[in-house]
Amino acid sequence: MVMLASFFKDPEFANVDSSENESIPFRGTILRTKSGKFSSVSEPCVSCTTFNILAPIYKRLDQQNQNVRESDFRAFWLARNERIVDWLLYESSSIICLQEFWVGNEELVQMYEQRLGASGYDTFKLARTNNRGDGLLTAIHKGYFRVLNYRELLFNDFGDRVAQLLHVQLVIPFLQNNDDSMQQEILIVNTHLLFPHDSSLSVVRLHQVYKILQYLETYQRENKLSQVPVMLCGDWNGSKRGHVYKFLRSQGFVSSYDIAHEYTDSDHKWVSHRNHRGNICGVDFIWLRNPNKSMKPLKISWAEAAFGIIKYQLQKASLNEKDAFDFLRADNNGNYITYSDFCDALKQLKLTSLSHGLSFQEMKDLWVQADVDGNGVLDYDEFKRIWYCTCSEHVDEDSNSEDSNEGITKEAFGFAVKNAILFPREVEKGIWPENYHLSDHARLTALFSPVRLRCSQKSL
């Protein structure tokens, strides 16, 4: 247990007033310049931090004995979490979204609620279903936002995952307009998706995002909020190469960190997590969707993402396009795929099951999308809708362009990404520092400034 003896030597447990504060991304309205230095931000801004803080019940302290967890050592988990709160309060982000929050420990919960509450935050916690022990905590600084509504989303699925939705309003409007009709409100989601223990769980993860977006769509429609920006924060347990990333891009969302650093969808330069297998990857995101961003219909995006998973599973079985078609049509003599063949193939690919796969209705919906002529079978050209109709890279189309059509009707409130930083800073270069033990995730903070957007009638 030498590792335990050196626990407090971790540089992350140095005093917050030490020289390492130069790495603090934002404190209030502090912005890092291109040269790496920090300067005050003259314009009004809000900041958002997302951080998977690694619940003590999951933190392993001895690699030779996986049953030794931090939760058994009060001094260790309390010191680490107090240190986390120190950092959070020093940064003082307007919005804080935490994952793997140990809701099952009353002492830890009270410590977070009391310290954040004393610093001006409203806190909202949500446990995962089936008494998993951990959950989510979202904190909203009362100096920036007034919480108008709070909703809890229980997926009740294979992974017992949950999500929080907060509808907030700026306490002091950033932008002034003559008729006061511009809604300076934001929808914020905090979530933690299922870990992809194997590729067959891709459908579960897609389901979880689909449920969030469906709920958002319904909430916005019922409350006439289609002209407000949306932030999705959390540990998405999937990288920029994954189906979830492509699904969200097709729905008009952008990764704040990648926008701030001018990275494309194909750039994979940063990481934010070292998982229990020792692999490093970028899985933590603050997604932003402004009200003037175009998007595909949600049901179409879902179908394309599901086709993408089917194609991935076929390629994983070393099947090329022609071989995949032959696999799907099975033993029938015709040069086509029947619905029965389609369902049998999805079962063989482990994409259907009573617990967490595609449902009967979903398979039927996918079939309808692929069967263009509606004759009950898929020929080779229709099969290509499965092979090629994945969620393509979404090109954002701002409706405030000069040649926008006659749909321009009113102004809306949105955000521009000013900056975003991961800490520890080494992860921005794809390196996981061995002396970092505050969590197995990096902390991501983004800074946003308000902007006026012109939205078409279609956008509203």
Image (cartoon, rainbow, N blue to C red):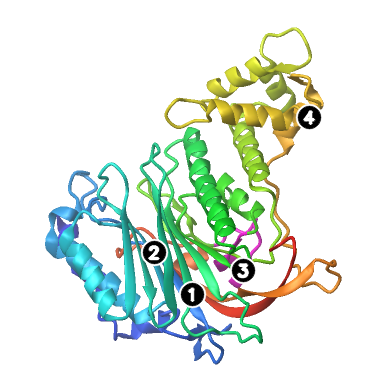
Please tell me which residue is depicted at 78% across the width and 28% down the height of the picture.
382
The residue range painted magenta reads 253-269
- Label 3, label 2: how far apart the Cα atoms are: 19 Å
Which of label 3 and label 4 is nearer to you? 4
Residue where numbered disc 1 is placed: 169
Which of the two discs, 3 and 4, labels the residue nearer the N terminus?
Answer: 3
- Label 3, label 4: how far apart the Cα atoms are: 37 Å
- Label 2, label 1: how far apart the Cα atoms are: 23 Å
Which of label 1 and label 4 is nearer to you? 1
Q: Can residue 429 be seen in this view?
A: yes
Which of label 2 and label 4 is nearer to you? 4
Residue where numbered disc 4 is placed: 372
Q: How crowded is mark 1: few (under 14 residues within 10 Å), some or many (20 or more)?
A: some
Residue where numbered disc 3 is placed: 259
Residue 19's disc number: none
**Taking 176 as reference, is 324 above or below it?**
above
Q: Does the magenta stretch include residue 262?
A: yes
Residue where numbered disc 2 is placed: 51
